[in-house]
Image (cartoon, grey):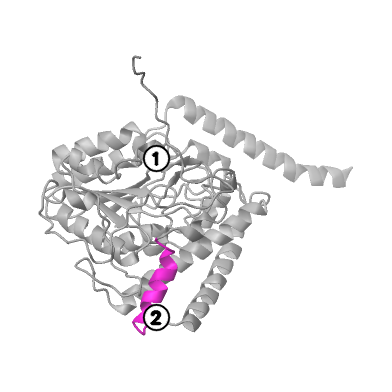
């Protein structure tokens, strides 16, 4: 009988009602992976795309050559940033459920991905995030009020009401606009990095996408240009196991790691424990040194887990086991850093509880201020004339006419509104 080909369809290890199964996750012992020189070639360090860089051991101590040896004060800052990011997320989720904003995406369980990397980079480096790296704004000092106002589309909305919630940007903070089109930020980051190199700047670009987005063509365009031109760029691929409801195996992570795609382009691929603050910091620092020395780009796969729903429009109980996050073998990034500081004698449960209380009050005060600039149902509201701005460098005549027509219409409506009470009084 002639053999017939069969189509392979990836299958998640567990579905709702089943026990969580993370046996597919390859985990290296903490401190076991060597740290090569930043000038090493992709071929020389190909094993780093299969192994997993880890620093924090089961005893919460930092071990191995990747230990960045951060001072306790720096670790406390990192912990503060991660706790603030989580509390902000939790508050915005509740606010969305109350109908006071229309949409939100949390980064619960992935705080170290953004916070540790953001702290390892320099303020002048350009960041091209996706929609789950709000921690980058926290690291660079962005007031929460600004992020909240964007979700409210009010008079202080940085996007002037033209973007869906959580699509932040910050020119002064060197954080590029988030795009709803998946993976576009990768080639944008590579192009920016190439321009920085052409201008002879000591700056690099860093970008983040999810593992599902790596199936987009833009991922491969970015990898090709970065490899060919040795662009000073860090390409972060966040493998949080789920692309909305689609398991990571459908994006190609079933048989090989996502980091293994790097050596295929001649780019070093590093696989790192994304819930280990110290490991993420160290790997980002290594990749940044490589970029600044004109050695070339780095692909980093951050292995983590999306603890919450994809967004407020998603119900994960329909496609994965309930409380699957509790079984995630790499733990929680905040808990792990907290326990590390406690093991060093530089933190305590009491201090942690006080920190949470302080930051909760800060989030509450920020939301109260954000509402003062307008809500979804109450004023003040954005001026409709702003719709004509920021589209063309030189506004074409037809839009100039339309803007003037709208201006005259609003003026006549305002005159009528002022005249009506007087007319009623005379009558």
Q: Which residue is pictured at 64% across the width and 49% down the height?
A: 376
Verify CB contact (< 8 Å) between mark 2 and mark 1. no
**SS of the residue at dot 2?**
helix
* In the image, residue 240 above or below residue 81: above
Point out residue 40 in the picture as x, y percentages from the top left corner: 10, 53
Q: Residue furthest top?
A: 1
Q: Which residue is mark 1?
A: 249
Choose between 168 and 70: the one closer to the eye. Answer: 70
Work out whether mark 2 precedes mark 1 in sequence or the reverse, and give the earlier one.
1
Q: Residue furthest bottom?
A: 345
* In the image, residue 324 above or below residue 81: above
Q: Choose mark 2 or mark 1, whichever is in front.
A: 1
Q: Quadrant of residue 263?
A: top left
Point out residue 279 in the picture as x, y percentages from the top left corner: 29, 63
Q: Which residues are magenta?
A: 330-347
Q: Which residue is mark 2?
A: 342
In-image side of 298 versus 413 (left or right): left
Q: Distance of mark 2 from mark 1, alpha carbons?
A: 37 Å
Q: Quadrant of the C terminus?
A: top right
**SS of the residue at dot 1?**
helix
**Is residue 246 shown to the viewer in this render?**
yes
Residue 343: mark: none
Q: Main secondary structure of the magenta part?
A: helix
Point out residue 19 in the picture as x, y percentages from the top left corner: 53, 52
């Amino acid at each position: 009988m002639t053999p017939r080909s069969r189509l392979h369809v990836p299958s998640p290890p567990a579905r709702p009602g089943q026990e969580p199964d993370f046996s597919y996750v390859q985990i290296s012992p903490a401190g076991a992976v060597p740290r090569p020189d930043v000038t090493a070639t992709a071929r020389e360090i190909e094993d780093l795309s299969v192994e997993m860089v880890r620093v924090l051991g089961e005893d919460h101590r930092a071990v191995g050559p990747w230990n960045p040896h951060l001072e306790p004060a720096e670790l406390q800052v990192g912990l503060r940033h991660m706790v603030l990011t989580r509390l902000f997320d939790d508050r915005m989720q509740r606010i969305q459920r109350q109908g006071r904003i229309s949409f939100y995406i949390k980064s619960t369980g992935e705080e170290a991905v953004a916070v540790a990397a953001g702290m390892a980079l320099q303020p002048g480096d350009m960041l091209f995030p996706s929609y789950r790296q709000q921690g980058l704004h926290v690291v660079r000092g962005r007031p929460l009020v600004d992020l909240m106002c964007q979700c409210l589309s009010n008079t202080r909305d940085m996007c002037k009401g033209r973007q869906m919630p959580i699509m932040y940007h910050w020119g002064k903070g060197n954080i590029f606009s988030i795009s709803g089109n998946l993976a576009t930020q990768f080639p944008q980051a590579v192009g920016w990095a190439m321009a920085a190199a052409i201008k002879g700047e000591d700056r690099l670009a860093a970008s983040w996408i999810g593992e599902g987005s790596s199936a987009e063509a833009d991922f491969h365009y970015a990898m090709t240009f970065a490899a060919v031109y040795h662009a000073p760029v860090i390409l972060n691929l966040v493998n949080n196991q789920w692309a909305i409801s689609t398991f990571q195996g459908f994006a190609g992570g079933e048989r090989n790691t996502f980091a293994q795609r790097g050596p295929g382009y001649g780019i070093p691929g590093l696989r790192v424990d994304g819930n280990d603050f110290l490991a993420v910091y160290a790997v980002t620092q290594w990749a940044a040194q490589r970029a600044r020395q004109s050695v070339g780009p780095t692909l980093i796969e951050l292995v983590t887990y999306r603890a919450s729903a994809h967004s407020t429009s998603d119900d994960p109980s329909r496609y994965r086991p309930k409380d699957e996050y509790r079984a995630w073998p790499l733990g929680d990034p905040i808990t792990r850093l907290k326990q590390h500081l406690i093991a060093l004698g530089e933190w305590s449960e009491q201090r942690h509880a006080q920190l949470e209380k302080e930051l909760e009050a800060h989030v509450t005060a920020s939301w109260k201020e954000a509402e003062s600039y307008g809500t979804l149902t109450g004023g003040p509201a954005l001026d409709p004339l702003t719709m004509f701005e920021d589209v063309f460098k030189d506004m074409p005549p037809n839009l100039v006419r339309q803007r003037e027509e709208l201006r005259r219409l609003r003026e006549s409506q305002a005159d009528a509104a002022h005249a009506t009470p007087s007319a009623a009084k005379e009558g």
